[in-house]
Image: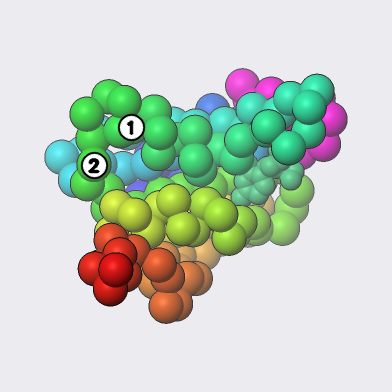
Amino acid sequence: MDYELIERAREAQQRAYAPYSHFPVGAALRTEDGAIVVGVNVENASYPLGCCAERVAVYSAVAQGFRRFVRIAVVGPGPGLITPCGGCRQVLREFGDMDVLMADAQGTSEPKIMRLTDLLPFGFGKGDLNGL
Ligand code: THU
């Protein structure tokens, strides 16, 4: 279990900007070469413009030159574990399969790991555009 990654997601969660939902989320991506890139949810007064923590992590990582990821850790505020939303699963899938680590903020329950392709079976990808 990549506890360092989970810890970085927990630290990031403190910086989430969630004044509307009061549901702070932290995410941390582990790149193939061992770097960590974090993300937090960033909400907006124009509600639909808010962005999930996982997507912020992916977009930030790509901007920093990373495109190959081995796993992502996601930490929600409650005692229960949260999974990436459908939109984030699709954004993650663009960059290949990876482990998704789900952990709570307090560290009371054991983190859970799932494969992205199990969370998003039959996802849409580059190859599907070839049918044009
Ligand atoms: N959110 C995330 O950042 N990641 C998830 O996996 C689920 C939901 C955010 C979006 C919104 O800012 C808040 O949590 C409530 O839905």
Q: Which residue is mark 2?
A: 67
What amino acid type should be assigned to the residue bearing mark 1?
A: Ala
In the displayed structure image, the side of residue 109 where residue 55 appears, left or right: left
Q: Residues within 10 Å of mark 1 (few under 14, many from 20)?
A: many
Instruction: Specify the quadrant of the image occupied by residue 82.
Output: bottom right
- Residue 30 visible, this angle: yes
- Quarter of the rendered image showing ligand 1: top right
Q: Horizontal and vertical percent for residue 124?
A: 40, 67
In the displayed structure image, the side of residue 72 where residue 17 appears, left or right: right
- Residue drawn at 22 percent across, 29 percent down: 65
Secondary element under disc 2, as helix, strand or loop, is loop
What amino acid type should be assigned to the residue bearing mark 2?
A: Arg
Q: Horizontal and vertical percent for residue 73?
A: 46, 48
Q: Which residue is mark 1?
A: 61
Residue 88 lies, with reference to residue 21, above or below; the image says below
Q: CA distance from mark 2 to mark 1?
A: 7 Å
Q: Which quarter of the rendered picture does the N terminus lie within?
A: bottom left
Query: Viewer-proximal residue, 41 or 127?
Result: 127
Q: Which quarter of the rendered picture does the C terminus lie within?
A: bottom left
Circles 2, 1 touching at the beta carbon (< 8 Å): yes
The reply to whether the magenta stretch includes residue 98 is no
Query: Viewer-proximal residue, 127 or 111?
Result: 127
Q: Residues within 10 Å of mark 2 (few under 14, many from 20)?
A: some
Please give the range of residues in magenta: 14-23
Secondary element under disc 1, as helix, strand or loop, is helix
Instruction: Specify the quadrant of the image occupied by residue 125.
Output: bottom left
Q: Main secondary structure of the magenta part?
A: loop
In the displayed structure image, the side of residue 111 where residue 64 appears, left or right: left
Q: Horizontal and vertical percent for residue 130?
A: 24, 68
Residue most extreme to the left: 33
Label whose residue precedes the other's in the sequence (2 or 1): 1
Q: Horizontal and vertical percent for residue 105?
A: 64, 42
